[in-house]
Amino acid sequence: MFWRVKVTLYSDRPIVLPLNYNHILQSCIYKTLTPELSSFLHSKGFEVEGRVFKLFTFSKLFGKYKVSNRVISFIPPVYFYFATSVNLIIDTLSAEVLKIKQVKIGNNQLTVESVDFNIIKPSNEVKVKTVSPITVHIPEENKNRYLSPDDERFFEFLKSNLNRKFMANFGYSSDDVLIIPLSKRWKKVVTFFKNTPVVGWEGRLLLKGEEKMIGLALSTGLGSKNSQGFGMIIERQQISSSNP
């Protein structure tokens, strides 16, 4: 099954985070899972063709905010999306989240206002929008070279990467998917994950093909570093007009 979770958090004071907070939100997610599952995902994951996939992703935080001196301050409530194709992750998350009423993100103690679990029911054609930047990189001279959507290899990588995730998830191969850019101009986003710069892109896409492939893209993300909070997409009709 393909799952998407919307987590809404509240505090009686502003939620203050460094501008690059992906690793802080990732840490909160891992701490919400059982130690055994968290350790498995963090250190092992699902391997195929020598590559490891965590098979989950999450979005940036949504809500009213202001930025000053590399610090972002949200006015509560805030929410974010989490998605996965692994039932065990959802089963564990749903069991653990019932036990807690508060979570800590950075130095912020937050109340869990609501957690909405939804089964993603993909069709064979869907328009999507990024809710965290898509990143694609290739090794070049002992460093990563990040590709942009202007490079045709960008979309070739998205498709081949999704096929490997499909193999990791289902145990067999499928490349029955088309990933078509809809945005004429993509927004470039440079994020630091801990101390490492990551170049990503925000925009709109059309996915066409096998429903399982599209469901996997919606539940595990596109591109690289999905478990670090990159590459999450959501159907455009599911996005509130108030979202950034």
Image: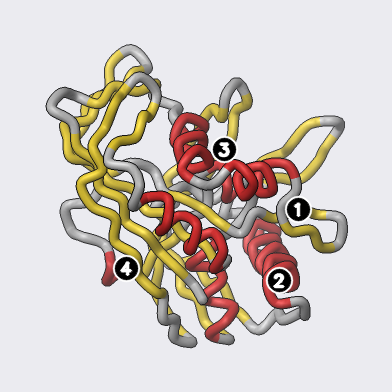
- Disc 1 is placed on an element classified as strand
Q: Which residue is mark 4?
A: 236
Q: Which residue is mark 3?
A: 199
Q: Nearer the viewer, mark 4 or mark 3?
A: 4
Q: Nearer the viewer, mark 2 or mark 1?
A: 1
Mark earlier in primary sequence (4, 2): 2
Judge from the rendering whether residue 214 lies leftward or rightward of residue 185; answer left or right.
Answer: right
Asked if residue 114 is positioned above or below residue 20 in the image, the reply reads below
Answer few, some or many: residues within 10 Å of disc 2's Cα (few below 14, many 20 plus, some between 14 and 19). Answer: many
Which residue does the image show at 42% across and 50% down from the upper left? 96
Q: Nearer the viewer, mark 1 or mark 4?
A: 1
Mark earlier in primary sequence (3, 1): 1
User: In the rendering, which numbered label is found on residue 52?
Assistant: 1
Q: Amino acid at mark 4?
A: Arg
User: In the rendering, which numbered label is found on residue 34?
Assistant: none
Q: Measured from the top left, where is residue 141 in percent x and y?
A: 86, 32
Mark earlier in primary sequence (1, 4): 1
CA distance separating discs 4 and 3: 23 Å
Q: Nearer the viewer, mark 3 or mark 1?
A: 1
Q: Measured from the top left, where is residue 154 in percent x and y?
A: 65, 57
Judge from the rendering whether residue 46 lies leftward or rightward of residue 95; answer left or right.
Answer: right
Q: Is residue 147 visible?
A: no
Mark earlier in primary sequence (4, 3): 3
Judge from the rendering whether residue 47 lies leftward or rightward of residue 110; answer left or right.
Answer: right
Which residue does the image show at 45% across and 55% down from the upper left? 93
Q: Amino acid at mark 1?
A: Val
CA distance separating discs 4 and 2: 23 Å
Answer few, some or many: residues within 10 Å of disc 4's Cα (few below 14, many 20 plus, some between 14 and 19). Answer: some
Q: Which residue is mark 2?
A: 163
